[in-house]
Amino acid sequence: MEGTEKKSLFSAVQPSGAVTIGNYIGAIRNFVKLQEEYSCIYAVADLHAITVKQEPAALRRNTLGLMALFIACGIDPEKCVLFVQSHVPAHAELAWVLNTVAYPGELSRMTQFKDKSAKHAENVNMGLMDYPVLMAADILLYQAALVPVGADQKQHLELTRDLAIRFNNRYGDTFTVPDGYIPKGSGARIMSLADPSRKMSKSDENPNGFVTMDDDRDTVIRKFKRAVTDSDTEVRFDPEHKPGVSNLLTVYCAFTGKGTEEAEREFAGRGYGDFKLAVGETVADALAPVQAEKARLLADKAYLSDVIAKGADRAFRIARKTLSKVYRKVGFYRGE
């Protein structure tokens, strides 16, 4: 029977504003594929979001918007556990226990803590430092065997593994030690359209550097028309010498399913103007049905509220089993 059970997989996304096409290609699109193969638990990570100052009304709006986007992209609440992190108190409860096996030195060395401390110098709070422990709690609560990770999260996953092993050694076998997972064909890393040496990010000071899942057709096409390329005219995949063109090819192939060689042949002898317009139109065409479905879902608050409530209930039941086990192991009195 054990051989037929699907491995569990956990991932979460913060509702901290606009979702870029880089987030979609690198994470959300793969969530849809993974739900067919694994027992998936997906969270809207609102507890993580408040480590940086948030406007409360905007956070509520973004939480609902991200949930709607997940479903509009094809994540099926019937096939996976889909929930809002703060609706399951066990996340914060387990994080507190894990703090007792986490050391200040290892948290202060986290690259993201250093980067965010520099970026938000006016708000260097303990939540910002403790973020990786909460992330560990997110994963370990669900005994997740696999965690999809990008380059910027590998350090956090290593800490999660360390905390799980440390806790298991101290209190006995309790947590599954998770492995990082890179889905097949998901290696695409989308860079800024304005500066292809940097990853695409919604925090880019140049709004032409990123395309969001909510950008209208004209905005999408305009941003791609302004994308940085080079002084050459050949559409060729060569990240070292032609980073801008290579980035656009990556985006084009991600949305069309074509290989880079096929795309190169398609644009052979055509100028960058035609190429950039084609990429922009392709992305805009792909986003249109997702945007329409997201708008429809947001107009049906009763349905979204039902999905969120049912998801929280399913997540709560799984998480409570792990937390109860943890509480017994550390010696909390629960009655006879």
Image: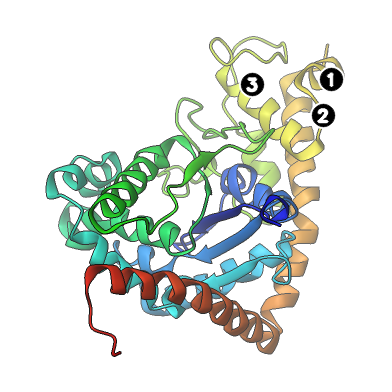
- Dot 3 amino acid type: Val
What element does badge 3 sit on?
helix
- Give the vertical position of 258 relative to 16 (above or below): above
Residue carrying label 3:
245
Point out which mark residue 125 bears: none
Q: Are marks 1 and 2 in contact (CB under 8 Å)?
A: yes
- Give the vertical position of 77 relative to 274 (above or below): below
Residue 46, picture quadrant = bottom left
- Mark 1 neighbour class, 10 Å CA radius: few under 14, some 14 to 19, many 20 or more: few
- Dot 2 amino acid type: Lys
- Mark 2 neighbour class, 10 Å CA radius: few under 14, some 14 to 19, many 20 or more: few
Q: Nearer the N terminus, badge 2 or badge 3?
A: 3
Q: Position of residue 165 (x, y in %)?
A: 32, 47
- Dot 1 amino acid type: Glu
Point out which mark residue 262 bears: 1
Q: Are marks 2 and 3 in contact (CB under 8 Å)?
A: no
What element does badge 1 sit on?
helix
What element does badge 2 sit on?
loop
Residue carrying label 2:
258
- Mark 3 neighbour class, 10 Å CA radius: few under 14, some 14 to 19, many 20 or more: many
The answer to whether 264 appears left or right of 167 in the picture is right
**Which of 31 and 203 lies nearest the eye of the viewer?**
31
Could you give the CA–CA distance between mark 3 and mark 1, rounded to whole angstroms? 15 Å
Q: Are marks 3 and 1 in contact (CB under 8 Å)?
A: no
Q: Which is in the foreground here, disc 2 or disc 3?
A: 2
